[in-house]
Every structure is written in C-alpha cells, then in structure tokens.
Image: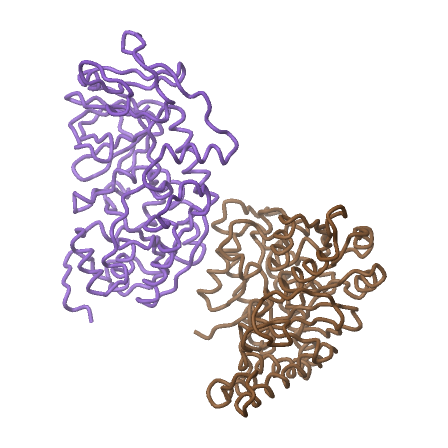
Amino acid sequence: MKRIYLDHNATTAVEPAVLEAMLPYFAGEFGNASSIHTFGQRAREGVETARDQVAALLNARPQEIVFTSGGTESDNHAIFGVVAAAARSLTANKPAPHIVTSSIEHEAVLNACQALENQGVAVSYLDVGDSGLVDPGAMRRAIRPETILITVMHANNELGTVQPLEEIGRIAAEADVYFHTDAVQSVGKIPVDVKALQLDLLSLSGHKLYGPKGVGALFIKSGTRLRQFLYGGHHQRGFRPGTENVPGIVGLGKAAELAGLHLESDAARIASLRDRLEQGLLARVPDARANAAEAPRTPNTCNITFPGIEGEALIIALDLKGLACSTGAACSSGAVEPSHVLTAIGLSAADARATIRFSLGRHTSEEEIAAAQEVVPAAVAQLRQLSPTYRREVSA
Amino acid sequence: MYSEVQLESLPAAQELQPGLVAVAMSGGVDSSTVAAVLQRQGRPIVGLTMQLWNQRRLPELQGDRPAQHRCCSLDDVYDAKRVAQHLSFPHYVVNFEEQFEERVVRPFVQQYLAGRTPIACTNCNTDVKFEPLLRMARQIGAERLATGHYARIRRNEKTGRYELLRARDDTKDQSYFLWGLTQEQLSRSEFPLGELTKEEVRALAREVKLPVAEKPESMELCFVPNGNYVQFIHAYTRERGEPIHDAAGDIVTEDGAVIGQHTGVHNYTIGQRKGLGFSAGKPVYVLAIDKANNRIIVGEDEALRTSTFEIEGVNWISIAEPAAPLRVMAKIRHKHEPAAAKVEALPDLRARITFDAPQRAITPGQAAVVYDGDVVLAGGWIK
C-alpha cells in the first residue's frame, strides 16, 4: 500500500540534504564541541554554522540562538526563565507577577503556566473567538502593572491560525513586557522575523521543519533577563548547559537554511493544494465545516468537522486505507477530553470529537490530494451509516 | 510454519465469513491467541485495545504496587501492541473511558449502594464491547468483531436465529456473562476460543511465540485494584463529591430482633458469613439486604435456600420467548453448578424460575442464566 502522509504538523521526514549534512557528525566528526583539540573544533564549526543558519531564518543574531532539546524545553525555558528572573526583583508585599497567554496554546505553554499558577504566579488566558485569533484589544486590557510576560503562539497546531503577533509585539513593547512566542508550527511555513514582530523570546523545533527530532532552539534577544533552566557546565555561554547534540544541531541548521530557500515557493504550492483539499471535502461531504478558515492560516493546515462521526474511528478507518491524518495535537490522541483548541473556538464536545486535521507538506503531491478527496468522503459515509447520532435529513 | 500444531477443532478458512475482522485485544493471552488463530485461518485482522479506565484516577487505591496485570494498565496496552507487532497486523488503542464509566462503573457502584451484588463484566460485554466497540469495528471497515471469550456462536438454520452456546472447555466457559447479546450482536461476533481448551490456547500462544504466552491470568475486576471493591466504592463516591456518610444500620434476625450493627449495606452480600462483627451461638449468614430500612437481615444457613425467584431485563437469546414453561438448567452466579429448574416467561421482560431443589443464596443484582444442554436460552437480572 502506498501511504499518504497528511500529518506534517505532527512531524516531518528529515530532508535527504539534512540527513546528509548530519551523517558526518555521528562518527567521523564526533568531537565534543567544547573540546580544545581539532576534533572539538570541527564539531564546534558545525554547531556555529547551524547557529548562523537558524539566526538567518529568524532575522536574529547568531548569539541570540540557544539550542535545546526541542519545542517543549524552549517553551519551558522561556516561561520559567522570565518568571524566575523577575522574581528576584519582586518583594513580598508586591502583587504576584502576571503572565498573559491565550486559551489555545500548546500544552508545553499551558501546562508550564499552570505549574506557575500553583506557585502563586497570576495567569490570564485570553479567549479566542470562532476565528481562533487573539484580540489585540483584549490583550491590551489584560496587561497590568505587574505583568512580566506575554506568551502567544505564532501558528496554532490544530487550526493553523496565525496570531496577530505584530500588533501584540507592539503592545508588549509599549507596556515594556517580555514577549515570547511558541513558533514551532510557523517556522519554516511562513516568514518569521523576530525584529518585525518585536519578540524577546521565540521557541522552535527541528522536526517540524524537515529536521531531526530531539533538537530545537530558543531565540533570546540580547539583554533579555532570563534565568537559566538547566544547571551544568558552561556550554552555550551557560544559557543551556549539556554537551551539544552536534548532529541534531547541524541538521536543524541545514533544515533552517532549506526552509529559507523554499519558503516562498512551498507556501504558494502547498496552500493551493490545501485549498483544493478543503474545498473538495466541503463539497463532497454533506454537513462538513472548515474551522477558522477565514482567519490567516499557515498554508499547509486545514481543520474540518464531519458532524456525526467519531474522529478516532475516522483516523483508524483512514489509516487502514493508507491515509495518515490526525484528530489534533499528536499528544492528545487517545485522550478523552475534547481538544481545548476546538472547544475554545466554540465547538461542542461532540463536534470537537468529530474533527480532523489535515496538514500537508513540502512533498505532498496533487495525486495524493486527489486520492484524499476520494478516500475521506467514502470513509465518512461509512462511519455515518453506523453512527447512532448522525441522521441525515432527506428532503423529498 | 505452523505445521507442528494440529488443532483439528479449528474451522477451515473456507467455512468462514469473508472480510476484515477486528480483534478485541486486552493484552492477555486469550485475546492475543484469538489474533493468532484468525491469522492462521488466513483472515485479514485489525487489533483494537480499549482504554476503559484511567489508572491515575483514585490514586489512593494504588497502594505500593505498580498498576499492572489489570485491564487498561499501560502494560496491557503495550502487551497488546507487542503481540500485533509480533504477528504483523495493524493495531489501535481506542478510548471508551466515558462509556465504561457511564455504563459499567457507575451502575456497579449504585447497585452496591442499593444493597445488590452487581456483575460488572456482563454490562461491559453488553454495553461496551459489543456495543460501541463493535460499532467502531464496523465503522473502520471490519465485518465482524472477535473476542477472547470462551463461548460459542452457532446459527440455527431451522429457526434462523444465532445461538449462544457454552464453551467446549467447561472450566473456562464464559457464556454466563454473555446472555445480554442481541441477535444483531451475535451475528457480527466470533469467539474463536470457544472450541479450544485453555491448554490448547496456551500451546498455540507458545507455538507462535506470542510475547504474552506465559502471562498470568487476571482474575480481578479490571477497574478495582486488589479486588477491594468496598475501598473502590468509597474512593469513587468521594471523587464524585458524594461521599458515603452514616451508612451504619441494624443487623436484625428474621423476627426483627436487633442483634448488631452493620457498616453500610454496600459492605455485604447475600450468603456472607464473615465480617458480620459479632458471634452468635450458631453460624449466621446474610439472608437479605433491606436498603429501604437500611437493615441487614441474618439467619441460619437453611433460611438461605429458596426455590422460586424472578428475573428482570430478560433477554431470550437463542430462542424466541416461549409461550409455555420450559424445563431448563439454571445458573445463578458464575461459580454456581447449574441446577434443574422450570422457567416461565412473564410480561415486561420478566421471567420466573423455579428450581426443583432449593438453591443457596439467590442474590439480587446477579444474573440467572438458563440453559438447554449447551445452549443459552435466556438470562436476566435477579430481582
């Protein structure tokens, strides 16, 4: 069976050129990038080239890039780091420090914020409407004198909606509040410019942009007061101790370089395939609805509700036919709770469970989209035939 | 490659229904062997493992032991997946926690609190395995659902009905838990182990080198750690914000004389001798649980024996509801040796069963199942 992969928001395949760039660093150039000798210097060269490549993609300076184990570590480092640094200057009789975020963040941000709430930090979770977008006006109103951090994701993993970071960045700058974004789902898909967005902190992950798993980066704008997250040696100027994952970092760097080269042409091509898939499914499946389709979105993502079905059953039915897609965040597969993102944009629990995410990639072909347009409607019809809740009204 | 094992009782592939079969896999040796049997028959299969209960709930019940060898523990899900990988067929974990709680756990607790002695496995079969799981199996493209139950299904060409029969291995027979299945459910189900003995199942599991071939059997109620259902009821009602208070009441004799105190009706079951909290001259047993008056009625062993009782929610499974009384063998709990009786259908899905000889501890909340030889005729809940 030739399988079709439409789950690129979960992870992507490592590009051949990325793999090729990484391979020498497993055995031949195996040195510890912190070593003085030639072995170490060669590894260091690989790491620093990667730092340049990642910085170039973000319009940042290389010294502002810290390599991490991935998006989750970057998010935790940014959020806990800002709070810990601010806590030093706070005294007991001042109000608790305050964070503003959105209700549709990835769990890496939401659960970090919740952990801080348990430690006495105040957190505001801004609602998003059915557009899936944070309202900048609401952001402005949420800021208090004790607000120390705004953290709002760039692109949402389930919907693809792109938040108005430029406006939020302006608000953060005016209020003199640190601004972090989880850009795991946007880097490599749309242009990301840390200066234009006035960001202080940005998280990204290698495996979402055709790089390897287990490596990511945190952009830390020069001058940002951030407590280190891990303690150890002096690697990466003490920002992130731990022997560098040299092959992973080299792979991330190469992936970032390729993303920069391909971004524009990829985006146009993928968006047109995505639109064709979305419109095709809406036309072929009765009662299907696209979620947050009016908002600015990443070019590769669409999110569709097929009322009357269980998303879990549809995913399995489609997988058995060779089509891979997802019910939302990969981490929530198998969870009982309906997606917090979909309920936040106003879907009922039943509709949230009847919702599927298709996320296309650099190598998705027209033939694959044509096949998906055949397979999905047939599978939905099969599920609905046996659904206890879906009764299609037949008009005479 | 399977030529060494000769299990003549397995039906040949050409007699079997075509199409994809979903296998309900718990991670245990029985349901894993089902997959091996079907695969040997050359049939396309897909494994489904139900996630039914979140082991992180009710943490006070966890004790020191890790959550293992109970259904829904991550170990079991992992075992099912390993079997699927070993035999190379697709496998998925499907989540039915909501349905399981609503249809099995909550009624189980409510029944105990109402002074009855429920059987959770019957509800799980009727209302979870052969309802949402069977539906999901068909939704994903499977024609049928196969499970590791020891029982048999046969189509009676004369009556056109699907019949439920006892397993060939009498010691493993689980037909007692399956009386609630409808004709539609039976028509879509397969019990490939019904023709095999437990020894044959183990032998087959070893033969195909299933990673769970030596796994011990789980005997406990899957969602109740350590078999302590009273502790479970307390933890569950506390979690739901409805903790049990002031459950204590009188223990009385049949004449109404108060001879002791009980700690809550959910702590008792009919026929119980131990744990009554006092010693009388003669051994005494729980005869009845009077929830309305919050009393436990006790008496001598002889008073536990009765002949006639009614069942409700009756399902006539292998035959249509009979117009006249039938001579049957009736079984009133899983470990009860079936006894000769007469069964008479009554209106509103009820029936009256009259044993030839009185039987001990006919317990409300348990099921009574009536057989004609190996054939399950009907079952219902003891009122």
Q: Residue at x 31, y 67 (%)?
A: B86
Query: How far across and down, in percent of the image, does residue A308 sit?
Result: 55, 49
Give the mark count: 0
Which image quarter: residue B278?
top left
User: Which quarter of the figure is the N terminus of chain A placed in?
Assistant: bottom left
* Horizontal arrangement in the rendering, residue A55 relative to residue B195 (left or right): right
Q: Residue B42: name its quadrant.
A: bottom left
Q: Hue of chain A? A: brown
Chain B shade: purple
Residue A45 visible in this rendered orientation of the protein: yes
B378 or A295, nearer to the observer: A295
Taking the spot 46% from the left edge, 66% from the top edge, the residue there is: A321
Q: Quadrant of residue A328?
A: bottom right
Considering only vertical position in the picture, is B302 above or below A306?
Answer: above
Side (left or right) of B223 relative to A82: left
Apparent side of residue B322 relative to residue B348 in the rendered image (left or right):
left
Give the color scheme: rainbow, by chain, secondary structure or one colour.
by chain
Residue A316: image x %, image y %? 46, 60
* Vertical placement of residue A75 versus A128, above or below: below
Q: Nearer the viewer, residue A13 or A75?
A: A75
Residue found farthest to the bottom: A38
Q: Residue at x 23, y 17 (%)?
A: B279
Taking depth in this image into account, of A169 and B126 the one nearest to the observer is A169
Residue drawn at x 20%, y 62% as measured from the top left: B206
Query: In the rendering, at what x and y percent does residue A225 appear?
Result: 73, 66
